[in-house]
Image (spheres, helix red, strand yellow):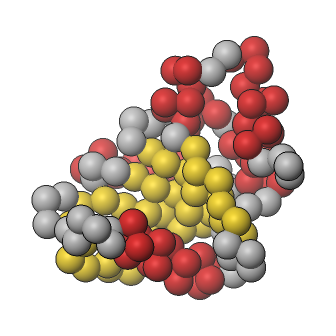
Amino acid sequence: MVENLFDWAKDYFKHRDIFEKKLNKINKEKDRLILNYKDRKDVAFISAVFEDELFEKLSDIKKYKKRFIVCSYSQTNISFLIKNWKKFLIENLILIFIDVRINKRVLINPYIHNKISDPDNLKAGILSLFSEK
């Protein structure tokens, strides 16, 4: 499953750059992709299932301009996000929940989402992003 996420993420970031053409190279490391652009470096952590250890891995992300976490689109990960919402409030962090089988994805920027959303309705708001319409 994790290899599928790595493959999907590589394709996703290549396609995101199709017009700007600033992406020089993507380096795969143990649990992440380093995205080397002409003017910056970004990082994408790849994790099929969110676990508490994720936050330890995020400790060195400040050196990257944009930070991504690519994870499986699952109820387990959505519940983990809601439960640990405050730990995800990192500037320029984008969470990408992906179901690679059907290329369904939801992107959330918790830092921005937290600024514009009603705290009392946080859980309902997040769950609405994942609801089938």
Residue positioned 67% across, 37% down in the render: 84
Q: Nearer the viewer, residue 84 or 115?
A: 115
Q: Residue furthest left?
A: 39
Q: How many marks?
A: 0
On screen, residue 125 above or below 96: above
Relative side of 104 to 69, left or right: right
Q: Quadrant of the N terminus?
A: bottom right
- Residue 129's x, y, as percent? 73, 43
On screen, residue 114 above or below 132: above
- Residue 130's x, y, as percent? 78, 48
Residue positioned 73% across, 37% down in the render: 126
- Residue 10's x, y, as percent? 44, 78
**Can residue 48 be seen by looking at this rendering?**
yes
Q: Nearer the viewer, residue 18 or 25?
A: 18
Residue positioned 62% across, 21% down in the render: 117
Relative side of 14 to 3, left or right: left
On screen, residue 87 above or below 99: above
- Residue 127's x, y, as percent? 80, 39
Relative side of 97 to 44, left or right: right
Residue positioned 24% across, 65% down in the render: 20
Q: Quadrant of residue 35?
A: bottom left
**Can residue 34 be seen by looking at this rendering?**
no
